[in-house]
Amino acid sequence: MTEREQEILQLLRQDPLIPQQELADQLSISRSAVAGHIMKLMQKGHILGKGYILADTPYVVLLGGANMDIRGSTSNSLRQGDSNPGRVSCSPGGVARNIAENLARLGADCRLISAVGDDLYGRALLESTQRAGVDVRPVLLLPDAATSTYLSLHGPDGDMAIAINDMEILARLDAARLAPQRELVRHAGLIMADANLSAEALAWLFAEAGDTPVFIDTVSAFKAERIRPWLGQIHTLKPNRLEAATLSGLPLDQASHAPAVANWFHQQGVVQVALSLAGDGVYYSSAAAQGWSPAPAVEIINTTGAGDALMAGLAWGWLQQQALDETVRFAQACAALTLGCTATNNPTLSLAAVQHMCTTLQYAEQS
């Protein structure tokens, strides 16, 4: 699905009776161009007939961080206590927001629940996220708070050396402010949340989720502790090496440790586990399948956002009812596209691009 088709589909979801001329006016294109895009959406099965009857597909609700990423990088070794020459850039970020953007670019119907300030960063985040095809109407716009920011420094290998996050605004996303979104959450086909949420927000979410599968991104070893009480209600979990070791209390410094760690999570009630182990690849595990998917051999330009793209791929695969091993390979292709991009989210990511990447990736040998 093209970006323009995503924009039109998003507007049709908000108002299925909107006239074509109004669509054209909102998008600053001609009415005939709108008609052409709608015809293509019908051919692809997203619109079922006249009156903009939309295909009955499950939507995804995403809850968690939405922030502006400020990235500093240098081609030289980082020198502590000194000024390092390099480049500084800003791009939309936040774990839940990033996953939502990637999923929307793949063609999923996504609704984001987060909080931003009524400031320059907040308005820019809402505009860019909506432009990517995400429904941002549930996002709280708070005039008395600052939008979250994430500041990261990267050395010549592209890996993050250190980061600072200012996400105080998410503490305002409490049970009382989440309550108006109860029906949105209850009727979702899939719920995706990150551990940036407060303990109160997580408790509210799991109380409202019912039988809807909940995917959790652990975010960091520190924040991963917040999900410990809810492990028995999590469908899919994607921790990295440090996060998984912190939660399980088991060693994970060698690839051979992965099955025992995954089994520990299953004993707690987690249905699917995808251990993201950098150069060792992904160890995936469920009742139906367990195994390794080696790390793709790709040039790394920027590591920020790759884990979020991986999580989006896992969610997409589940929505398409793919087998877990196939889903993991698809998710790794999403991450590979993001690793090769300077921005936190690759603007060229699409279903077609990921499918093509799946056919061209070379994989490193499992150690």
Image: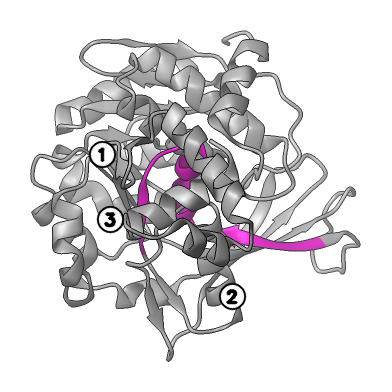
Name the residue carrying label 2. Answer: 121
Mark pair 3, 1: CA separation: 28 Å
Relative side of 159 to 255, left or right: right
Q: Amino acid at mark 2?
A: Tyr
Q: Which tag is nearer the camera, tag 1 or tag 2?
A: 1
Quarter of the image for residue 365 reads top right
| Residue 215 in picture, x, y percent from top left | 29, 40
Residue 286 is at least partly visible in this image? yes
Q: Residue at x 48, y 42 (%)?
A: 38
Q: Amino acid at mark 3?
A: Arg
| Residue 98 in picture, x, y percent from top left | 50, 51
Q: Which residues are magenta?
A: 88-113
Looking at the image, residue 74 lies above or below residue 337: below
In the image, residue 167 lies in the stretch drawn in magenta: no
Quarter of the image for residue 69 reads bottom right
Mark pair 2, 3: CA separation: 27 Å
254, 144: nearer the viewer: 144
Label of residue 58 in the image: 1
Name the residue carrying label 3. Answer: 226
- Few, some or many residues within 10 Å of mark 1 (<14, 14–19, 20+): some
Figure colour scheme:
one colour
| Residue 258 in picture, x, y percent from top left | 39, 20
Q: Earlier in the sequence, mark 3 or mark 1?
A: 1
